[in-house]
Amino acid sequence: MKKFKVLFVCTGNICRSPSADGVMRRMLADERLEHAVEADSAGTQSYHIGEAPDGRAQKHAKKRGYDLSFLRARVVNQSDFAEFDLILAMDKGHLRALQSLCPPELMSRVKLFLSVLPEGAETEVSDPYYGGAAGFETVLDQCEAGCAALLKQIKTQI
């Protein structure tokens, strides 16, 4: 059986997208769905290739039981568009960057991550990089809500 594959994307792949990746991996493990669904993350820019997630992101994630320490930043590559069933942008800037790279026939795979939430909810995951601790907590709140809704949606497809 082919795994359903989800890619989370932010700028440098050190804050938002690895947070979403870690949250989703934990939810998949909790539901014993790792055999059916795979999560990964990447960045639109190559600033941090090979680096672990931001220490602040790791610290706040760890407090909630998410391990991000094994993740390493990478940049989105052309093969990702064919390999992943969903490519989820953390904000509209990432969405535009992904859409400019994506082959037209695969464009339906590229979406805003929080578009899975009910109408009227936030649409973008806020960037915590230049802020304080509260920003990283907000990102985790957004990732938990988004991943829960996404997993519910994915379960209807697998």
Image (cartoon, rainbow, N blue to C red):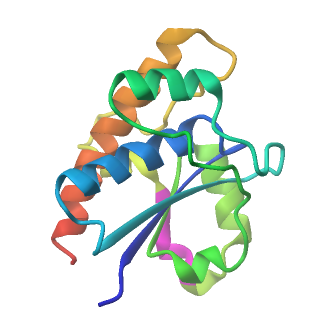
Q: What number of labels is visible?
A: 0
Is residue 123 found left or right of 27 in the rendered image?
Answer: right
Q: Residue furthest front?
A: 70
Is residue 25 found left or right of 43 in the rendered image?
Answer: left
Residue 148, position as x, y percentages in the image: 24, 46
Which span of residues is magenta-colored?
106-111
Which residue is located at x 38 percent, y 38 percent? 143
Q: Of 55 and 86, which appears nearest the observer?
A: 55
Is residue 10 found left or right of 59 in the rendered image?
Answer: right
The image quarter in which residue 157 lies? bottom left
Q: Residue furthest bottom?
A: 1
Q: Is residue 77 magenta?
A: no
Q: Of 71 and 135, which appears nearest the observer?
A: 71
Magenta stretch, overall SS: helix
The answer to whether 56 is drawn above or below residue 17 in the figure is above
Which residue is located at x 21 percent, y 78 percent? 158
Which residue is located at x 60 percent, y 27 percent? 127
Residue 71, position as x, y percentages in the image: 58, 49
Quadrant for the N terminus, please.
bottom left
The answer to whether 97 is drawn above or below residue 103 in the figure is above
The image quarter in which residue 98 lies? bottom right
The answer to whether 107 is drawn above or below residue 27 in the figure is below
Q: Residue furthest right?
A: 47
Residue 135, position as x, y percentages in the image: 51, 17
Residue 68, position as x, y percentages in the image: 51, 40
Which residue is located at x 23 percent, y 43 percent? 118
